[in-house]
Image: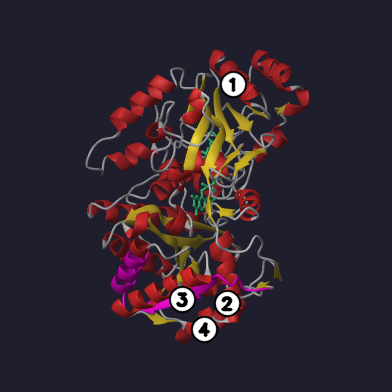
Amino acid sequence: MPSERGMTISRFTTSRNFSWEYKHMNDEAYKMFESVLGPDNVSRDPGLLDAYTYQWLGEMIGEPNRFGPFRPACVTLPSTTEEVQAIVRVCNRHGLKFKAHSTGWGLYANPGEEGVVMLDLRRMNRLIEINEKDMYAVVEPYVIWAQLQAEAMCRGLNCVTIGAGSCTSALANCTSLMGTANNNVSMGYNERNVLGVEWVLPDGEIVRLGSPGSGAGWISGDGPGPSLRGIMRGTFGALGGLGVFTKCAVRLYQWGGPAELPSENIVSMDERLLEYPENARLFVPYFESRVMMEEALARIGESEVAYSTGLLERGLLTLGLGVDNLNSAEMRESLLPTIPKNFFTCLLVGNSARELEYQTRVMNQILEQTAGRRFEMMEQEGFRDIITLFLVKGGSVPAKAVFSPTGSFNPLLCGFFGTRRTLVKGMDDAEEIKRKYIESGLLADDMAEGGWSPLIMDHGHMEYFEHETLFDPHVPESTLALIMLTIETNQSLADKKLMIPFASQVKVARAQGLSVHDSIAAHMNCDYRTWQRQFKQAFDPNDAADSCNYITPKPKA
Ligand SMILES: Cc1cc2nc3c(=O)[nH]c(=O)nc-3n(C[C@H](O)[C@H](O)[C@H](O)COP(=O)(O)OP(=O)(O)OC[C@H]3O[C@@H](n4cnc5c(N)ncnc54)[C@H](O)[C@@H]3O)c2cc1C
């Protein structure tokens, strides 16, 4: 295994030692929470609190059993913006830190230190409005993508359902964390799809961004009221480090497909659509090289014909095919000779038969120009239905491929936005570096072909790729290999002056006890931390919002 370069990862040198006394939760503040929320909606039961430290990838920052290193001080369940505001104010008054938790799918919502007050927003679950005319929906934090998409599709509308899966919070994604999805190609990155926002600042003040700020409805996030989109989230989000978002409007788009997509054999590779939508067509093209594949992607983006695109590299695809690891290995052996290396999936959805024909002609022309050929096996009924469902909704195939074989995974290049050519450099880099870690036997063997991605954004001028890496969370050496691989890959990108992927770096930074932006900014052309710290200080004078995934008000020693 590659050397550790003298690094100390705190999780391997410390053992978890929770105190059963609540040093950080003073009784006076706790009583105030009870009086605001009622005693049933606040708890400091240790068993319950530990549930907020237990998380996928907890093993990267805590123990192999997935418990993170910090137990929260207490958990609160507000149901209104005013209750959120009251909790935040009590925290400020008593010197307590707080953290928002919407659907809590990853370790991002875990407390970053001892004594954090959790705001679990599950009671704020209202889909407040769907405005069909102006094409937006107003949601609270616990509305998930599946719910929003189902409601939108009934009305001939649709939304960007992210790759995390349709069970995650639409608001958390739009306001606070990333926004990458297969259907970014037709509906954009979710940073742009958040319109009006209601925001409880870290000191308890309520701000309404965009048109809600001047009582003009939710249609705009940038005016006639104030726009703070860049400060609020920028490209990746503040991950809870700048307060609590309590409502937001999400942009909806035209949907040319049917109102529902009924299927059978749900959550299996045998899932079948009862009827294939007449306005949809699946293309699965493959190419001689990554460079040609990327060229085709850029042209598809520019031509604006695709509804959704996706990439699932061979290694990852075959890991997810079988019912168990042995079966997957057998299937890989038999199928591998028939699967080309450089292929992606692309779903066309026309608003009419005529539009679908136009899209098809454009696709065929692009494939001709880039020497792309059709991977017909994948376009036929067996695979076609499951791929189509996946591209429309965000489906179960990658979840099975990434979680079942070893119990855990973490993406390399998570947050890697490339441009023409830089995408391919990032993909090549990750593959080459990963290969030697696989040889060590500490990571799952996916032939270093674990790529997954939505691929196209911004009409082909920005492209996204991440490389899933499966490791065994119960074997500390395997987790360490993952961390070292991520560090080495990110360093290699930095050496080439390519973007350091935020969402990969944030986890290794936490494993090392570093502030993520301190570990990224050093490699960028300008030191954005100066401004970011000033925003943090101005918006959060008491440093009350847990900033473990954002920026600390002062540089760490
Ligand atoms: C396996 C996996 C795959 C993922 N894939 C993708 C992907 O393909 N594309 C993508 O865009 N994202 C992805 N994510 C990231 C993330 O899950 C999503 O962005 C998601 O929409 C947010 O839901 P969540 O359950 O993670 O939110 P949470 O865990 O509840 O929160 C995420 C972060 O946002 C903060 N936050 C949550 N709610 C609020 C609020 N109301 N106010 C202020 N801050 C808040 C939290 O403190 C936390 O830091 C993935 C995560 C995982 C675990």
Three-letter amino acid code of the residue under disc 3: Val
Determine which residue is flagged by label 4.
377
For the residues bearing labels 4 and 1, Cβ distance under 8 angstroms: no
Q: Nearer the viewer, residue 87 or 150?
A: 150
Q: Which mark is residue 278?
A: none
Classify the position of the N terminus by image quarter. Answer: bottom left
Please tell me how crowded label 4 is: few (under 14), some (14-19), or many (20+) other residues with Cα within 10 Å. Answer: few
Which residue appears at 48% of the width and 38% of the height?
A: 195
Q: Is residue 233 visible?
A: yes
Disc 4 element:
helix
Q: Amino acid at mark 2?
A: Phe
Q: Mark 4 and 2 residues: CB-CB less than 8 Å, in contact?
A: yes
Tag on residue 383?
A: 2
Where residue 85 is drawn, which disc sits there? 1
Secondary structure of the residue carrying numbered label 3: loop
Residue 226 at what x, y percent from top left? 42, 26
Evaluate if marks 1 and 3 touch, with contact meaning CB atoms under 8 Å apart: no
How many callouts does the rendering have?
Answer: 4
Judge by depth and name the residue closer to the eye, 426 or 291: 291
Of mark 2 and mark 1, the one earlier in the sequence is 1
Q: Which residues are magenta?
A: 275-300
Q: Is mark 4 within 8 Å of ligand 1?
A: no
* Secondary structure beneath label 1: helix
Instruction: Residue at 56% x, 76% y: name it.
Output: 384
Tell me the CA gap for discs 3 and 4. Answer: 9 Å
The residue type indicated by label 1 comes to: Gln
